[in-house]
Image: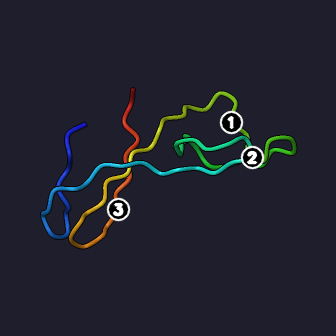
Amino acid sequence: MAAPVCPTCSKRLEGGFMLDHGQHGVAVTQWVEGAPEKSFWTGIKLKGRRQLPMYAWRCPSCCEVRLFAPDA
């Protein structure tokens, strides 16, 4: 993915990712399609839902962060 430009100040954004600290270690935050539905066993139902890794882009000038979840 090419580095996008900040819509606020037109600077090139710095790439990175969102870290998720869970019960089973650390992982990259995921985008999940649809509205969240509670699950007794896992907290949130995920079965049958599309999941994509999220990428974060941060502006070094104004500090705005934009999130993207491109199709693989």
Q: Which of marks 2 and 3 is in front?
A: 2
Residue 34 image position (x, y, % from top left): 58, 43
Q: Nearer the viewer, mark 1 or mark 3?
A: 3
- Marks 1 and 2: CB-CB under 8 Å? no
Mark 1: give few (<14), some (14-19) or many (20+) Cα within 10 Å.
Answer: some
Residue 24 image position (x, y, % from top left): 72, 41
Assign a secondary structure to mark 2: loop
- Marks 1 and 3: CB-CB under 8 Å? no
Q: Nearer the viewer, mark 1 or mark 2?
A: 2
Q: Residue furthest right?
A: 40
Tell me which numbered mark, 2 or 3, is placed earlier along the sequence: 2
Residue 60 image position (x, y, % from top left): 24, 66
Q: For the residue marked with disc 2, what is the amino acid? A: Gln
Q: For the residue marked with disc 3, what is the amino acid? A: Val
**Residue under numbered circle 1:** 46
- Left or right? Give the position of 41 relative to 28: right
- Left or right? Give the position of 13 relative to 11: right
Q: Which colour scheme is used?
A: rainbow
Could you tell me how far apart the alpha carbons at marks 1 and 3 are, in whole angstroms?
26 Å
- Image position of 7 with respect to 24: above or below: below
**Residue under numbered circle 2:** 23
Where on the picture, by quarter, is residue 13? Answer: bottom left
Could you tell me how far apart the alpha carbons at marks 2 and 3 are, in whole angstroms?
26 Å
The residue drawn where x is 81% and y is 44% is 39
**Residue under numbered circle 3:** 65
